[in-house]
Every structure is written in structure tokens, then in C-alpha cells.
Image (cartoon, coloured by chain):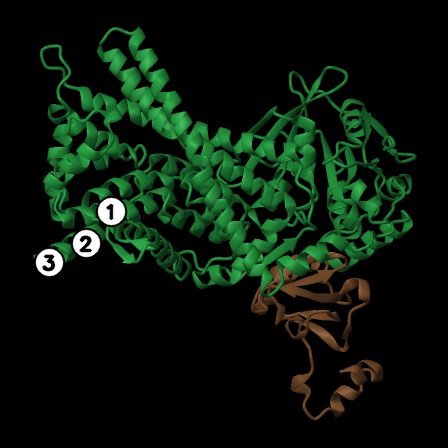
Chain colours: A green, B brown
Amino acid sequence: MSATHECAGCPVASLPVVGPHHRLVGLVGPPNSGKSTLFNRLTGLRQKVANYPGVTVEERRGRARLDSDTEVVLIDLPGVYSLTPRSEDERVTRDVLAGEMEGQRRPDAILLILDSTNLKRHLVLAAPVLALGLPTLVVLNMADELESRGGSVDPAALAGQLGAPVALVSASKGEGIQTVLDFLDGAVGVPRAMDLPTLADIPRCRQWAVGVGDRAGYAAPAPPLWTRRLDAVFLHPVAGPLVFLAVVVAVFQTIFSAARPLMDLVDAGIRASGAWVGALLPASALRSLLVEGVWGGVGSVLVFLPQILLLFLFIGLLEDSGYLARAALIADRTMRKAGLQGKSFLPLLSAYACAVPAVLAARTIENKRDRIATILIAPFMTCSARLPVYTLIIAAFIPERPILGPFLGTRAAAMLGLYLLGFLAAFGTARLLKSSVLKSDGSPFLLEMPPYRRPTLRQVVLRMYDRSKIFLRRAGTVILGVAIVLWVLAHLPLSAGQMPAIGNSVAGTLGRALEPLVRPLGFDWRIAIGLVTSLAAREVIVGTLGTLYGMDAGAGTAGLQTALRHDLTPGGAVALLVFFAFAMQCLSTVAVVRRETGGWRWPAIQFAYMGLLAYSGAFVANRVVTMLLS
Amino acid sequence: MLRLSLNGNEHRVTLKNPVKISSTLADLRPGQSGTLTTLDLPAGDAQRLMELGFLPGSVIVAARSAPGGDPRVYRVEGTEFALRGDTARQIHVDASTVARAAEEDR
């Protein structure tokens, strides 16, 4: 790749270095321009993700190290088609560029990233960005694809037309990145004042873009042949849905079967290290806090990490290859029946592993109402943390009998029924929300279909790293806090310097106090304690019940099953299953929903709604089962 | 339809059954193209679509769709966007321009 193409006659100004601040450079570009790929390329692992204050838009910052041994701070602004503030994303980008974002300095320079294979359409964004008058480098991305598909452009001529320097790069292959770094490092031209059309007049803006493209010798590339061929299969009326199903099954299979040995390994590692720490310390309250509280609590989250990593691997592959847009297209009709849209499909699929990554995945839904509705129903999907609870209760109360010969037994049917129950609750809630508080604002469903591209390892791994970090930080800190609080509740008050049995602890007292409340559901005080401790993570109830019944955690659940059969009626057992299917027994999810919806309002409503549904559902289940069996 | 495209606009009035004239994006069959005339949508939504290239005068090609035909992918200047039927029905094309799209655009 050649060096930057400067524009002749542009005034040159050094980027200001304001006091102790690093130079601040904003990355602007339309969706699917490869903006984030360039951002990752420039910053690598030196990234930070936060939320802009008061909005649900993600703020991505990173540092790029330059040859001159200085650093610049890059902000990856949300992808926008224009600077007319119509969506939250566009408002954030516009406000940051105009220097009107609260708590955010105006960038010193701009990297405007445009897809060179779609130049005439993407150039429309150049007019309002250049009109800002900030030093700007126009980055024509995907230069390799432009060339391989027989298109071309004269960057020097384009620089002359735009009054700003132009660089041809391929962010995914790393070609031309040096030019971008040189721009960030050196003296940069302020765009020459040009007669630029305003965006309000879209036809004129387009005319301008087409004219600029023509004068810069832009020859559009041939249509992406491979994309057409692949779409002939993936969007085929018969083959398309089959491929879609195969993808869904493959994702499911991997996150449940393939992740299993890895999860067992992590689990064994946590137990072994916990035992090792335990052996180092003398028997004391501190040892108990460290081993049972901290180690056990954090371990209950860490154990899901292999599954989350695999899930993000799949999401990355689907997104970067371009198949996700096709999947959203195919799923749209079904999702519409619930009042949602095609893009809700991926978050809801992810929710079968864990609601936390699902809520994070909902970011790809631009429509705010649809995004919030998706976030609100995601925790109804049967996540993996419910499985240990379901397995325990089903094994204890439902005798294994064949229903459909060797294909389906009673236990498997019960498990499937619980999956269905969660799905139906999600579906019904979505309908309810989308016909009331989150009714669609009527803005049209619009889905860009990018050409298929080969995902790069670098990009996929970076995303796995980035998302897992958020998962660990969010879920981990909440769990750590909750685990310590619960340990304290279960081990105080001391009587004669000794820790009490859990039944006599604060948690035990709490459980007894809650007993009248849960009695109509068929639960006793032990289950009540379990409901409290499982707020940390649903499967924690299994460990808590083990402790309450004095079972050794390593001894398996056979003893626990017998004990439960003794204390819990069949009605109570079914009620417990229903309760766990509906209740938002997961403070990590609450924390992530708060972050993603920008406040406590939605997580509070969600927690109350799901709790109410769980309570009434369990109440009805207990009554009905008890009546049927008497 | 072929005759229409050859003879131009005047013939539209002479047709007995003008209702059948292909006149919105939703009426385009896969592989057909037409020239956009008006966007019968709220100003903000029309602007958004215009920014993406759905401008009066643009040639739009109907491409593949989800099973059942909705949403459908439309191609404009080499980029593909999927629209639902209810949106596509609000975007009008000049019926006289509806034709089979060029080979490389189909």
C-alpha cells in the first residue's frame, strides 16, 4: 500500500497536545465499514469499554502506540449512516464530534472510515464530517476487496476532491496501517474549506458524493460473486431454514456437550485450589470465609467461563462471516410473532447458556424498544445455572419411565417441559411488553446484508477476550460481594466463639422468618434459605441444601435426593421447579441489565415481574399437583 | 409488463385494470428491478432510507428473501438491505420501469 495521499494546498497544522492529555482521535464510519476492525488493529488489547453517561450506547476507547513512542487515545464511535441525530447512536457520535458530550473532550482529529467497495454510498457521510473542520484522515477500508473485485479509485484525486488526506487500507489484513499511524503521529492537514452539501438535502448530498467519486476515478467493484452463490444456498426457501437449524443445533451442542469436560476441569481446578488454600490455613472463620465464601462463590461463576468463551467464539464467527444477518433475516418472521425482530434471535439463543452474555449481545439491536424488550425476556430462557437445580429435583421426585419407548423418558420429558415453560413465559412477556409499554414506534425494520467475509482469528479472539472480561468483571464482582455477604449470614452470630450451625445462623433465622411466605408454595425454611442464597447464582441452592442437610459437597446428590423426598411434597417439588423457571434468581444479570439499560428502572421492574410470576406460578403448581395426587 | 416498459407512461391510463400494475417494492418479483419514485413513509424514516440510497430515481433490485417472502432483500447500488413487506409496500416504483434486472444484478 502506498503512503497517505495528501491534498495539495491543504493548510497543515500539528495536532495539538493539550497539557497532560494525550491526543484524542475519534473513529467515525457507517456500520459495516470495518471501523471496529481498524480500531482493534490500532489498539490491540489496550482497550476499555464503558457506557456513555445516561445512554445505553457503548463507549470504546483504546490506546495506540506510535513510532515516536507517544500514545494517542482512540474512541471507536458508534457506527452511523449520517450525523442527523435520529437514534441514540447517532446522537452520541454527533455530540462527541461537536464537543457537546458531557465529560468528554472534543476529539483533536478524526479517522473517517469508509468502505471502498461501497464508496459512493459511504461518501455521503464525508460531507458532514469534513464540515466539522477537524483534522481528518479519510480511510478507504477493504482496499484488498476493492482490488480483487476489479474496482479502483485514485486516492490522490479523491484527496483533492475532499480537501483532506486519503489512505487506502485493509484493516483485516493489516495493509496500510502504517499510513494511519503516521497520520496520528505527524502534522496533519485541517480539511480545506470546501463547498459541502448539508445532509438535510439528501439528494444533493448524494449527487455530490457521486460527483466526487466520478472525479476521483472511482470504478465500483463487480458484485461479490461468492456472496451471491452462498446466498443462493443460505437464503434458499428449503435449504436456508435447514442450514439455519443446523447452525442453531451446532451452537447448542457445542455450548452444552463440548463445554462440559472443560467446565468439569475448571470445577476440579477450583476445588483443588480451594482445598490447597484450606490446608495451608488453620481451621478458623477466616479459612471458612476464604474457602467456602470467596472460593466457592467465585468458582460458581468461573465454572461457566468455558461455555461463555465458546458462545462468544460462535457469536464472533457468525457476526464476522456475515451469516448472522442472514440468520436474523430468517428468524424475523418467527420473532415478529412475539412482537420482536430478527436481531433478537441471537441474544435469545445465547440466553440458553447464560443471560449475562445474552444481555450484552442485545447491543446489536439498534431499535431501543426492541433491545429493552429482548433484554427483559432473556432471563426466562433456560440458562445452564438452572440445570443443576432441575436435575436434582427431577431425579429426586420423578421416577424414570419410558413415554415413547427408548426415545423419551419421563425425566427427559420433564426437562423439556421446563425449557418449554421458560420459552412460553418469554414469548408471552414479549407480546405483553410490545403491545404496551414497549410498543414499536413504527420505525421500519432495516437490516444491512454485508457480503460474506472470512472471519479473522485476531478479530474473533479479541472479541472473546473483551466480552469475557466484561462477564468476569460484572458477574465476578457481584458474586464476590454476594458470596461474602451470604457467608457472613450463614456463619453469624458466633455463640461462645463458635460458628453456629446454619440453621441457627442469621440465614437460618431469615429462612424461618420467610417460611410463612413460602409455605403456600410447599416450601419449608430450608428451601427458603436456598432461595435467598441462590440469588448469587441459581445453582448455589444445591450447595446450600447440601450444607443444610449436612451432606458433604463431594458426596454427590444421592443423599440429598433422599433427604429432599422426606421434606418436600411432590407439589412443593413441582412448585420449586416452576419457581426456578420464572424467578430472576441471579444478581449478576440484574447488575448487567442495569448497566445495559442505563439505570435501575428496568432491572427493578424485571426482578419484580419475574418474582411475582414465579410466586404465583409456584403457588398454582403446588395446589394443582397436590390436588391431583390426593 | 414488457409492453408497458416499451411504450412508456401514457399507456398506463389506457389499461383497464391499473390495480394490477406493479407499483411498490413489495410487488417486484425476485430478479426484477424498478426505479423508485416516492417513499410514502414518515419523514424521519424516509430520510433514513434515502441516506442508504433508497432515493427517488434510484434503481432498486429485488433479491432473495426469508422463507415465505418476508422480509425481502433489496439491492441498491451494490449494497443489500432487507425490508419487511409493510415498509416495502410504502415505497413506490415507476411501474413502466419494472423489468428484469441486468444479469450481474440478479
* Tags 3 and 1 on a common chain: yes
The amino acid sitting under disc 3 is Met
| Badge 3: residue crowd in 10 Å (few <14, some 14–19, many ≥20) | few
The kind of secondary structure element at disc 2 is helix
Q: Which residue is mark 1?
A: A577
Which chain does the residue under circle 3 lie in?
A: A
Give residue B31's quadrant in the image: bottom right
> Can residue B52 be seen in this snapshot?
no
Could you tell me which residue is drawn at 65 percent across and 54 percent down? A449
> Can residue B62 be seen in this snapshot?
yes
The kind of secondary structure element at disc 3 is helix
Q: Is residue B85 above or below residue A560?
A: below
> Is residue A602 rendered to the left or right of residue A158?
left
Whichever of callouts 1 and 2 sits on the residue coming sooner in the sequence is 1
Estimate the spatial distance between the alpha carbons at disc 1 and disc 2, rounded to whole Å: 9 Å
Whichever of callouts 3 and 1 sits on the residue coming sooner in the sequence is 1
Dots 1, 2 in contact, CB < 8 A:
yes
Estimate the spatial distance between the alpha carbons at disc 3 and disc 1, rounded to whole Å: 17 Å
Q: In the drawing, what numbered circle is on residue A627?
A: 3
Dots 3, 1 in contact, CB < 8 A:
no
